[in-house]
């Protein structure tokens, strides 16, 4: 088994045994019911007391065989509204780029993304509209976030 | 170079023979060391911590100490021979041998000769295992050196040989502080005990640790550490085969631990014996726990 597969198997065990409240993370199931360890469907809850509260935001982690030397690609759904998320959904976060370290667990990645939600980094914006609203029209920005939270909450109820 | 001077030097081929014998001895001793260790571990494993195996353990300890003392002697001896070889080579190359150089050579010969003697002693002590494989011609060399030294340095040197008590028996007591011996004791101890053996681990003597959580998980594979190695520069521990994979073709990589900015070198990874033991102990504990759980179930 390759290092990527070994590590992902252990990550799965660890996450099943112990994970932060409200989060979920599981590898995708193939057509033949086997697991595709290279693609994980995860859910990140918005922190209580922030405009993100109530929503559970779906994130897809895509690993390659160079993991854990290289970070997984982490993406929200297309069109996700966040200052540091590209239109494609790709997340711009230092630990998922240059600051990646092989010891960072999936749990830590998800917690890092949760933290990013309410702590956007205007120094490396990925969404010009979000940046503009965040700088010039905070109420409109917050409304967008809250609407999005409702949308993701509704989605969860439908599932 | 005059005929006399050339004669007073040992032949390079002879020195080479000594060196190759050294290598042979070293390999044999290492093998010996391994098998003694193996024997001690299996004994502890099979018989447990019974007081009546103490005697056997003591004699095993003694053999082990003798072996490492011999190893040390062989190392000294090999070192001297290498030294001697360099001097002979230099002397052969340069046409003029000054007095100093000659002196040095002779001093060296004394050392080599002494080492040879201790080897002779040692060899006698372990005759049964080693007799067949050693080329005893090196002993003849010693005889050679003796007579030639007399030519070179006069009788006072010969007297020195006779007076000096260089034929001391091996000091095996001294070897008790050898790290190899400590490792043996520690490993044997951990077979039947769940707490580490105190007193032998003198490395952290000054350090008082109230409580400490040691992870037995490899931060890279997130599985249980396998052959743990420690990066000397930052102290982080990884499974050997996993961290080696991380290096790929590089000699140096940034430490894979988040928050650690150190660069770690492939050749600065050292076996982490302490962690190795912690892992073994923890696994044994879990196994016992498992067994106990199984027994409980059968009882029901």
Image: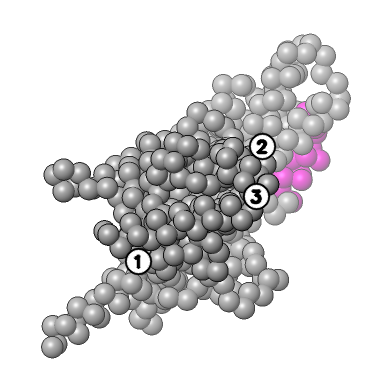
Callout 3: few (<14), some (14-19), or many (20+) C-alpha neighbours within 10 Å? few
- Please give the chain letter of the residue carrying mark 2: B
Callout 2: few (<14), some (14-19), or many (20+) C-alpha neighbours within 10 Å? many
x and y, in percent, of residue A62 in the image: 38, 41
Instruction: Kindly identify which residue carries mark 1.
Output: A17
Quadrant housing the N terminus of chain B: top right
**Magenta stretch: includes residue B88:** no
Q: Which residues are magenta?
A: B152-163
Instruction: Kindly identify which residue carries mark 3.
Output: A137
- Which residue: 73% across, 13% down? B93
- Which residue: 76% across, 32% down? B106
**Magenta stretch: includes residue B162:** yes
Q: Main secondary structure of the magenta part?
A: helix
- Please give the chain letter of the residue carrying mark 1: A
Left or right of residue A32: residue B113: right
Secondary structure beneath dot 3 equals: loop
* Circles 3 and 2 on the same chain: no
Occupied quadrant, residue B279: bottom left
Is the residue under label 2 in contact with that under label 3 (CB below 8 Å)?
A: no
- Please give the chain letter of the residue carrying mark 3: A
Q: Tell me, yes or no, if residue B233 can be seen here.
A: no
**Cα distance in 3D space between marks 3 and 2:** 83 Å
- Depth check, mark 3 against mark 2: the one in front is 3
- Which residue: 57% across, 72% down? B212
> In the rendering, which numbered label is found on residue B272?
none
What is the residue that sits farthest to the bottom in this orientation?
A: B300
Pointer 3 or 1: first along the chain: 1
Quadrant housing the C terminus of chain B: bottom left
Q: Pick the residue in front: B151 or B112.
A: B112
Q: Pick the residue in front: A65 or A22.
A: A22
Instruction: Kindly identify which residue carries mark 2.
Output: B80
């Amino acid at each position: 088994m390759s290092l990527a597969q070994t590590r992902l198997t252990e990550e799965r065990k660890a996450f099943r045994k112990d994970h932060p409240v409200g989060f979920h993370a599981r590898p995708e199931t193939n057509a033949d019911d086997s697991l595709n360890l290279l693609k994980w469907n995860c859910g990140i809850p918005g922190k209580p007391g922030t405009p993100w509260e109530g929503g559970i935001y779906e994130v897809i982690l895509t690993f390659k065989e160079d993991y854990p030397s290289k970070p997984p690609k982490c993406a929200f759904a297309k069109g996700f509204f966040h200052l540091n998320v590209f239109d494609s959904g790709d997340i711009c976060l230092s630990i998922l780029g240059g600051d990646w370290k092989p010891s960072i667990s999936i749990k830590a990645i998800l917690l890092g993304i949760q933290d990013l939600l309410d702590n956007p980094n205007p120094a490396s914006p990925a969404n010009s509209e979000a940046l503009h609203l965040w700088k010039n029209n905070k109420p409109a920005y917050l409304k967008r976030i809250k609407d999005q939270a409702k949308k993701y909450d509704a989605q969860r109820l439908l599932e | 170079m005059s005929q006399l001077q050339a004669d007073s030097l040992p032949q390079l081929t002879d020195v080479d023979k000594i060196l190759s014998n050294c290598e042979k001895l070293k390999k044999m001793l290492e093998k010996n060391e391994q098998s003694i260790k193996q024997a001690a571990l299996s004994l502890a494993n099979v018989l447990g911590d019974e007081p009546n195996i103490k005697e056997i353990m003591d004699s095993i300890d003694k053999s082990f100490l003798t072996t490492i003392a011999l190893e040390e002697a062989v190392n000294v001896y090999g070192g001297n021979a290498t030294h001697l070889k360099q001097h002979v080579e230099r002397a052969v190359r340069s046409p003029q041998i000054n007095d100093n150089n000659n002196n040095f050579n002779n001093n060296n010969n004394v050392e080599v000769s002494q080492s040879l003697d201790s080897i002779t002693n040692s060899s006698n002590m372990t005759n049964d295992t080693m007799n067949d494989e050693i080329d005893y011609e090196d002993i003849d060399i010693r005889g050679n050196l003796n007579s030639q030294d007399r030519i070179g340095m006069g009788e006072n040197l010969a007297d020195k040989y006779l007076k000096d008590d260089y034929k001391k028996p091996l000091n095996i007591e001294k070897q008790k502080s050898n790290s190899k011996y400590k490792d043996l004791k520690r490993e044997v101890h951990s077979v039947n005990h769940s707490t580490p053996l105190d007193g032998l681990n003198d490395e952290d003597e000054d350090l008082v640790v109230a409580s400490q959580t040691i992870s037995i998980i490899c931060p890279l594979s997130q599985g249980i550490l396998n052959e743990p190695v420690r990066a000397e520069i930052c102290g982080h521990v990884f499974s050997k085969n996993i961290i080696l994979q991380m290096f790929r073709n590089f000699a140096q990589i940034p430490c894979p631990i988040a928050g650690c900015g150190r660069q770690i070198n492939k050749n600065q990874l050292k076996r982490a014996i302490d962690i190795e033991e912690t892992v073994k102990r923890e696994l044994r504990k879990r196994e016992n726990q498992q067994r106990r759980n199984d027994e409980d179930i059968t009882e029901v």
